Image (tube, rainbow, N blue to C red):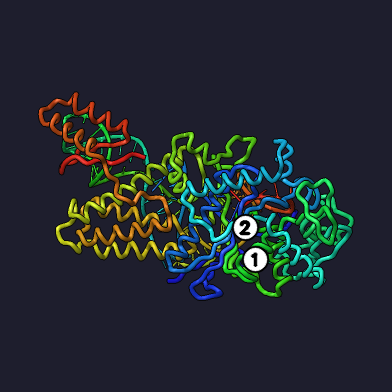
RNA sequence: GGCGGCAUAGCCAAGUGGUAAGGCGACGGAUUGCAAAUCCGUUAUCCCCGGUUCAAGUCCGGGUGCCGCCUCCA
């Protein structure tokens, strides 16, 4: 079995083949930095991170680029209006550059807290204006774009494949119905590559005039090309990016280079909250701080957001997060139990007992992820291993093999506590004291010690084979 | 109006046309000084209606509900 991935472009699962053997070039549509990333954003980025991790698990060298959009997003009207970052800047009465810088920093902090692997590059739109202009010039020369005043538009009708990704037909886009059709455009669906506006705060001088700024879509075409080359393997984003954003990117890049842009277009579904859409008016747009404020750990949120299949809607509630935390605790426990069984504690007498079952779990795990990154199926295999070890069906060798595999599986999920935790001598002394108290049936004292340690985050369990402890959370 | 997706137990969530993974929770029992952990057992005919088929959660048609896009958006 090899990795198969669903390609939005062809609407089917396809065998994954890279342009260059062993190397994956992947571009992830990143955030617009005018506010804090919410858990919906995080789900999408977490999907990209998981995909990368699965590719790396398989031995690919992944060149991952995730952009930071710090200019160019337009409000209100498709082609004219206020930049989102500028709008926020006005609201806060701040310099737009300070706004985007601040949010970019926070974004990286959020990713780090959630255990993201670092992308090879996080290019900023504002730092790639020349690269954008280069493409715009090329498109003008090739006749795919036209200039009217200080504006440049991409002429959609010149690119026959426009609409292939989204399934939209240019003539049925209903353009002009809800948006005011701008007179200078040759077709309502034509989109801006470059705009001029004196009012704009973030602007650049070009041959189109002194007050220009780029259209939204051009940045990704330029940054992807700059950092990964004309052709890439994977381009990801949320499902909302399919149209118009990615449709336009394809048009621009392919018209410019004359070659296929990305081999695989992969999109994650939206996160829902309370079974419906997330929205400010419902007050259910949460970010990492909201999650931390409720006493949850970042990795618990991570587990919660990756536990479903990326191509199906996923529901989030605080109750579900709590359930996720409980499930994750049991995965941590799996590691602990395997480590013990590998040492002989609770292991089956014959060292190779259960070795076959462990092999099957690994095989199923990999088959699940090979099948369009089916995380829930892969997770189920981990829980099956837990049942095996709890039932004492694994011998020492099998447990050691399972432990090695589970640790490796965590390279994909990045959620488990796989390092052995240690307690200090003082804690060990208290545990011994409690055992002594129990022996003399001084339960008041033994419970006092147990409660004290619990308050320190250490849970004691009196098993038939002796007392064991674990750290909480 | 156009394009696309989803609908599986109390809550999540898999599922290749052949008889419903897994997680969390709940209930009953065992074990325990108590608790926790663990063990045993119980807990779904898959939104509705019709059709194809020997056989459908899985295919087709029609509903209903929710989500996304067509306007910035993960």
Q: Nearer the viewer, residue A128 or B65?
A: A128
Image side of residue A39 versus residue A447, left or right: right
Residue A1, percent across and down?
A: 42, 71
Residue that carries the numbered disc 1 in the rendered image: A226
What is the chain identity of the residue bearing mark 1? A
> Is residue A370 placed above or below B25 in the rendered structure?
below
Residue at x 80% of width, y 52% of height: A79
> Label 1 crowding class (10 Å Cα cut-off): few <14, some 14-19, many 20+?
some
Quadrant of the image containing the C terminus of chain A: top left
Q: Which mark is residue A353?
A: none
Viewed as shown, does residue A258 lie left or right of A394?
right
Q: CA distance from mark 2 to mark 1?
A: 9 Å
Q: How many marks?
A: 2
Say which label, 2 or 1, has the lower sequence index. Answer: 2
Query: Badges 2 and 1: C-beta atoms under 8 Å apart?
Result: yes
Image position, residue A333 (x, y; %): 30, 47
* Above or below, comparing residue A62 to residue B42 in the picture: below
Is any atom of residue A420 visible in this view?
yes
Mark 2 chain? A
Above or below, A358 relative to A197:
below
- Please determine whether, in this image, residue A347 is positioned above or below residue A285: below
Q: Residue at image x 11%, y 31%?
A: A439
Does residue A166 show up? no
Do marks 2 and 1 both belong to one polypeptide chain? Answer: yes
Mark 2 neighbour class, 10 Å CA radius: few under 14, some 14 to 19, many 20 or more: many
Residue with the mark numbered 2: A123
* Secondary structure found at label 1: helix
Q: Where does residue A18 sit, x and y in percent of width and height?
A: 53, 73
Q: Residue at x 34, y 57 (%)?
A: A407
Res. A214 image quadrant: bottom right
Helix, strand or loop for disc 2: loop
Q: Nearer the viewer, residue A171 or A3?
A: A3
């Amino acid at each position: 079995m090899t990795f198969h991935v669903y390609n939005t472009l062809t609407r089917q699962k396809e065998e994954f083949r890279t342009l260059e053997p062993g190397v994956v070039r992947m571009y992830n549509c990143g955030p617009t930095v005018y506010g804090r990333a919410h858990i919906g954003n995080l789900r999408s980025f977490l999907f990209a991170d998981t995909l990368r991790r699965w590719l790396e698990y398989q031995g690919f060298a992944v060149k991952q680029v995730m952009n930071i959009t710090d200019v160019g997003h337009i409000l209100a009207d498709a082609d004219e209006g206020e930049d989102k970052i500028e709008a926020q800047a006005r609201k806060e009465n701040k310099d737009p550059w300070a706004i985007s810088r601040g949010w970019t920093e926070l974004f990286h902090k959020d990713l780090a807290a959630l255990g993201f692997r670092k992308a090879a590059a996080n290019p900023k739109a504002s730092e790639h204006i020349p690269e954008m202009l280069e493409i715009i010039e090329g498109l003008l020369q090739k006749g795919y774009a036209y200039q009217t005043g200080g504006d440049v538009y991409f002429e959609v009708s010149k690119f026959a494949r426009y609409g292939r990704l989204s399934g939209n037909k240019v003539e049925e886009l209903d353009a002009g119905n809800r948006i005011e059709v701008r007179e200078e455009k040759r077709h309502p669906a034509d989109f801006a590559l470059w705009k001029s506006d004196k009012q704009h705060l973030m602007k650049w001088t070009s041959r189109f005039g002194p007050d220009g700024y780029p259209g939204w879509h051009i940045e990704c075409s330029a940054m992807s090309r700059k950092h990964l080359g004309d052709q890439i393997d994977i381009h990801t984003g949320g499902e909302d990016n399919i149209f118009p954003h990615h449709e336009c990117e394809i048009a621009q890049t392919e018209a410019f280079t004359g070659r296929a842009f990305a081999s695989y277009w992969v999109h994650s579904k939206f996160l829902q909250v309370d079974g419906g859409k997330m929205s400010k008016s419902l007050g259910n747009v949460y970010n990492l701080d909201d999650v931390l404020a409720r006493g949850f750990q970042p990795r618990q949120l991570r587990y919660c957001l990756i536990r479903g299949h990326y191509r199906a809607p996923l529901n989030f509630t605080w109750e579900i997060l709590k359930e996720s935390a409980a499930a994750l605790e049991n995965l941590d426990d799996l590691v602990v139990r395997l480590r013990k069984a590998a040492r002989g504690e609770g292991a089956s007498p014959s060292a190779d007992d259960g070795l076959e079952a462990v092999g099957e779990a690994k095989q199923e795990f990999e088959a699940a992820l090979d099948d369009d990154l089916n995380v829930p199926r892969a997770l189920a295999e981990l829980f099956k291993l837990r049942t095996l070890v709890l039932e004492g069906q694994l011998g020492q060798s099998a447990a050691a093999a399972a432990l090695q595999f589970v640790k490796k599986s965590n390279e994909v999920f990045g959620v488990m506590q796989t390092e052995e935790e240690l307690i200090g001598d003082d804690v060990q002394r208290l545990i011994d004291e409690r055992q002594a108290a129990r022996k003399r049936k001084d339960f008041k004292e033994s419970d006092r010690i147990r409660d004290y340690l619990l308050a320190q985050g250490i849970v004691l369990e009196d098993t038939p084979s002796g007392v064991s402890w674990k750290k909480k959370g």
